[in-house]
Amino acid sequence: MDASSLIHSVIDWLQARARERTSWDGLTIIVISVLALIASPIIRYVAWLGLVYGIWTIWKKEKRFPFLN
């Protein structure tokens, strides 16, 4: 089997899979899983930043402007 027929075989196989619903389901699951793996470290840092900001806002005294009462 030469390279050209191998490439055509792979393309035919991919096109056949693209017509199947289960292939779309699998692709969707793979994409969501990869996005979750990529986003999980980012979400962890955002959660820590939110925790620190929440504690800071509780600790900090609110500034009152006398002319706004």
Image: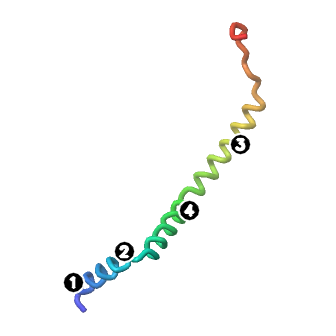
Q: Quadrant of residue 10?
A: bottom left
Residue on which the image places disc 4? 37
Label 3 sits on what residue type? Leu
Q: Residue at x 73, y 33 (%)?
A: 56
Residue on which the image places disc 3? 51
Question: Crowdedness of circle 4 by 10 Å Cα count: few (<14), some, many (20+)?
Answer: few
Q: Residue at x 73, y 15 (%)?
A: 64
Label 2 sits on what residue type? Ala
Relative to 17, 25 lies left or right: right
Q: Residue furthest bottom?
A: 1
**Rendered view: 6 above or below 19:** below
Please provide percent x and percent y for residue 30: 50, 69
Q: In the rendered image, which quarter contains the C terminus?
A: top right
Label 4 sits on what residue type? Leu
**Rendered view: 60 above or below 34:** above
Q: Residue at x 51, y 68 (%)?
A: 29
Mark 4 / mark 1, whichever is N-terminal: 1
- Front of the two marks 2 and 1: 2
Q: Nearer the viewer, residue 51 or 30?
A: 30
- Spatial CA span between label 3 and label 1: 57 Å
- Front of the two marks 4 and 2: 2
- Spatial CA span between label 4 and label 1: 36 Å
- Spatial CA span between label 3 and label 4: 22 Å
Please provide percent x and percent y for residue 65: 70, 12
Secondary element at image label 3: helix
Residue on which the image places disc 1? 4
Residue on which the image places disc 2? 18
Please provide percent x and percent y for residue 49: 65, 43
